[in-house]
Image (spheres, helix red, strand yellow):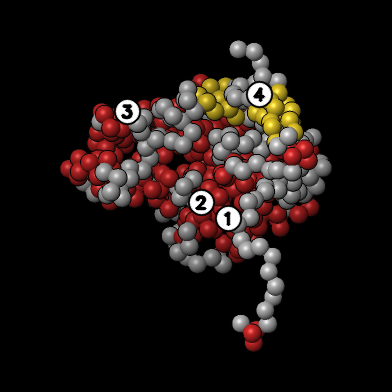
Amino acid sequence: MSKLDKVTLTAGDKNVELPVQHPVLGQPCIDIAKLPKETGCFTYDVGFTATAACKSAITYIDGDAGVLLYRGYPIEQLAKNSSFLEVAYLLMNGELPSKTEFDTFEHEVTHHTMMHEAFRTFLYGFRHDAHPMAMMVGMLGSMASFYHGSLDLEDAEQRRLAAIRLIAKVPTIAAACYRYSIGWPIRYPKNNLEFTTRFLHMMKEVPSEPLELNPVAAKALDLLFILHADHEQNASTSTVRLVGSTGANPYACVAAGVAALWGPAHGGANEAVLQMLEEIGRPENVGSAVAKAKDKESGFRLMGFGHRVYKNFDPRAKIIREMCHQVLNELGVNDPLLEVAMKLEVAALKDEYFVQRKLYPNVDFYSGIIYKALGIPTEMFTVMFAIARTAGWVSHWLEQQTDPEAKIGRPRQIYTGYAERDYTALDKR
């Protein structure tokens, strides 16, 4: 089949030629930039599911084939051989670091983990029982007030430093939000520990006794962070880019990304998995739950199965499934909900109804189980997602800042309200 260079659109008695853009990987895109001028018409695409809003070299997804690439590297290879911080460097810079480059990057991230002490005062202004994501949105948005002297977006070094600060401080802020919500004293980061272990200490350690962590906990968390680091132009990443297109500072952009991630249709999916498991309750109820899921009239849905993008098995789920079972085996957690999850996994993978519809367990299903096994409360699940996704958000923001084609986002609409009408005085209504 010959390469398609242009398409012709017939609008009334006029033919309009539209150029076709060809990505390195993926489907060609019709460039409709001149369509309004040539035809007087815009396009209508609910949810932008058929529209490319930008050019990006960061992440590529092939949903039909179950492929996820970070900067060209298959997620399977990165999950097996890399670490979250190395993946963060890769996403930000486009190439894997040399030993010297990685050591410098790790040192920078490690030595930007501290929060300004005034953050404590700000944090204590929230209700004690506030959702950690609500606190995250406010805390991250406030970061611009602490670094207002280094917000010159024309300065490449200031942009890079802002990205480093966000990757470094989001875990510290996340742990502080959690501890405040349960009435524990805030713990400072231990910079002699690596990224995920440091976060677990900030979150779980108490002053009265040292924290003893099973190494599998940090290993599993690091893997989850790698798998969640970026996922192309999803809702939260697109939000970061849309806010970034206005020239807003990076802290505001990432705060907006966190707000978008909070939605149950996006980052809240692994939280919904645990709520579903609690609704099922006991392992012996799994059979009836599966039957209810097949009945469209029941209103019951299996959460954490299938994926909007991946039409086959989620490649991240294949990786995390093995780690999930390893965590459960090594930690030996005795929790009825985890028994429910494992029985549900087996039932769904064998049931012809789910197999035919390719409703396989996805990354949200397994990540929720791992978080539960690690003793991380359900309300923190989306926060964990935000820690990982910060690496992707700042990478997209950095890329956008140097894009010569970038312009402020301004979607169109189809107006469905009243036509023009005259005002009627109050005493005449």
The x and y percentages for residue 358 are 36, 30
**Secondary structure category for the residue under label 3:** helix
Mark 1 touches mark 3? (CB < 8 Å): no
Of label 4 and label 3, which has the lower sequence position? 4
Of label 2 and label 1, which has the lower sequence position? 1
Q: Nearer the viewer, mark 2 or mark 3?
A: 3
Tell me which amino acid carries mark 3.
Gln
Judge the density around disc 1: few (<14), some (14-19), many (≥20) Cα neighbours within 10 Å: many
Mark 4 touches mark 3? (CB < 8 Å): no
Judge the density around disc 4: few (<14), some (14-19), many (≥20) Cα neighbours within 10 Å: few
Tell me which amino acid carries mark 1.
Val
Distance of label 2 from label 1 (alpha carbons): 9 Å
Q: Which mark is residue 426?
A: none
Residue pointed to by mark 1: 137
The residue positioned 54% from the left and 28% from the top of the image is 61
The x and y percentages for residue 419 are 66, 62
Distance of label 4 from label 2 (alpha carbons): 31 Å
Residue found farthest to the right: 154
**Secondary structure category for the residue under label 2:** loop
Q: How many marks?
A: 4
Residue pointed to by mark 4: 23
Judge the density around disc 3: few (<14), some (14-19), many (≥20) Cα neighbours within 10 Å: few
- The image shows residue 345, relative to residue 263, as above or below, that is above
Distance of label 2 from label 3 (alpha carbons): 31 Å
Of label 4 and label 2, which has the lower sequence position? 4
Residue pointed to by mark 2: 262
User: On the picture, is 391 further left or further right than 131?
Assistant: right
The x and y percentages for residue 169 are 61, 47
Residue pointed to by mark 3: 356
The reply to whether residue 30 is in sight is yes
Of 122 and 32, nearer the camera is 32
The reply to whether residue 75 is in sight is no
